[in-house]
Amino acid sequence: MSDKSDSSVKLFSYSDDQPVDGKGILIPRKGDWHPKHTFTPLNARSSSTRSAKRVALSFFGLCALIILGTSGYGVVSQANLASAPTVTIIDPYTKNATTLEYGPQDSLSKNNLFIETRDAFIEEGLTFIEADISKKQLRFFENGVLLVSAEILRTGDPGSRWGVPSGLYKVERKDEKLFTTTGQVFLPWQITFQGNYIIHGWPTYPGGELVAEDFAGGGIRLSDESAEKLFEHVKKDMPVLVHIDTKETRDQFIYETQIPELDLKHYFVADIDNGTVLASKGYEEQLPVASLVKLMTAVVATEKLSLDGRVRVISPTFVTSLIPRLAERSSVSVYSLLQLLLVESSNEAAETIAGEVGRAEFLEAMNAKARQLGMMNTNFADPSGLSSENVSSIEDLYTLTKYIYKNKRFIFDITANETLSNVYVGGEFDGLVNFNGAEDMDSFIGGKVGETIAAGQTSISLHKIQFQTKDRTLVVILLGSENRTEDIGTLLSYVANRFSH
């Protein structure tokens, strides 16, 4: 790639599978046919009133943006098809390329990258949905031309099952009117993307009554008129670009040290809200993690399956659960499976979830999600955690914990066996036994435990602790423990004694 380029937004093509540096030339996926159409981004075109200059794309301050069509933009644009592009971030100095995976992308919460991506879509004449939740604005562009602009009336609470994080998504299905079992309402003109993220009109109860304005169930809510108009134009696989500005006031809370020393194998304690590490040992060491795997199983399940949906139960014969519950059932809701998975650590539930997607595909998605989050010391060999080949590091598990805490906190709510806010119907199983909490530890607000011969006892737990009259949320991670409950208590006591309490 030439460093003399006057644009940070480029398109490339292959000739006989060899990359050719040339603005406005496109990349087809595979095959012998190559499109002849060429496009030059607007900001790369010369004009008498505007000198050509390099447009700096701010992605950590150093990146360029490349958009690749799934079959060549010439075909997509001229045929007016909904096609999901590939967005790649290029470091202009190292030339290293990073492709934005479809799904939640924290980088798109950065305003500059979001704007550059959206503008590149427009300049290349793409058809896509833009949802800027921070500005409460949804727009639909057809071939780069604004066709629908609507106010976002309400969104799901951040971290809830309805909350939509910043990211690049694809439309998966459309339903004129769909009943949500967890919300117990009808959602008109529903557009579904990434499994459980939705755009829809004003919800109604089964009797036809409109829900109140502050009703929290549902996703991105539009007026019925706007939702219907959007519904008419949207097609499957159409890109959905979502932005939420996550700039927060810097957490100024300071921990003041008082007492040192601690003797445990692999542990980690941090304030999850401001990132202060209070105690750590064996941070980067790769170790078996046992059922902590199920947290990633839950993350991928919520991105691949609808929580309102039901799945067929084919009880796997190669795993057992401490409390078998699926043998006599022919089907079960995804939400109930998540409860079994996260509360009772059901291996049957893990395999049933994976089997619904396709076990190999599900495992591939788990490992792909790990790579997307930067969990480079992690490998998932099964969805339950039984295999000793399920390995990770405390560093990677902390990354996963922060992701869930920020984007899918309802998963931790389930692990605490709490009734989810915005979910108006319970699961199908009564008397669930929660394996995650520890006796006489009222500070526990969520987490997951695991245990195998190879891994020993493992744990990720969140605790609400008061420091200096303020409630703080601490994350405690243990690997290779011999007595998980005792070690968690030791770590929390250590933190309480070492820092001002």
Image (cartoon, rainbow, N blue to C red):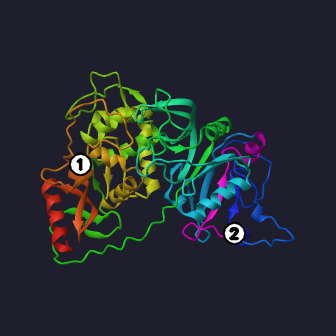
Q: Is residue 350 shown to the viewer in this render?
A: yes
Secondary structure at badge 1 equals strand
Q: Which residues are magenta?
A: 55-79
Q: Along the horizontal axis of the image, is 443 left or right of 363?
A: left
Q: Is residue 386 shown to the viewer in this render?
A: no
Quadrant of the image containing the C terminus: bottom left
Secondary structure at badge 2 equals loop
Q: Residue at x 53, y 51 (%)?
A: 101
Q: CB under 8 Å between callouts 2 and 1?
A: no
C-alpha distance separating marks 2 and 1? 49 Å
64 is within the stretch colored magenta: yes
Res 311 → quadrant: top left
Q: Nearer the viewer, residue 455 or 348?
A: 348
Give the residue number, with chain letter if any, for mark 1. 449
Q: Residues within 10 Å of mark 2 (few under 14, many from 20)?
A: some
- Amino acid found under the numbered disc labelled 1: Val
Q: Residue at x 25, y 52 (%)?
A: 445
The furthest residue to the right: 48
Give the residue number, with chain letter if any, for mark 2. 55
Q: Earlier in the sequence, mark 2 or mark 1?
A: 2
Q: Nearer the viewer, residue 121 or 204?
A: 204
User: Residue 188 at what x, y percent from top left?
Assistant: 55, 33
User: Residue 432 at what x, y percent from top left?
Assistant: 22, 36
User: Residue 239 at what x, y percent from top left?
Assistant: 61, 46
- Amino acid found under the numbered disc labelled 2: Val
Q: Nearer the viewer, residue 226 or 444?
A: 226
Vertical placement of residue 247 versus 239, above or below: below
Q: Which mark is residue 128?
A: none
Q: Residues within 10 Å of mark 1 (few under 14, many from 20)?
A: many
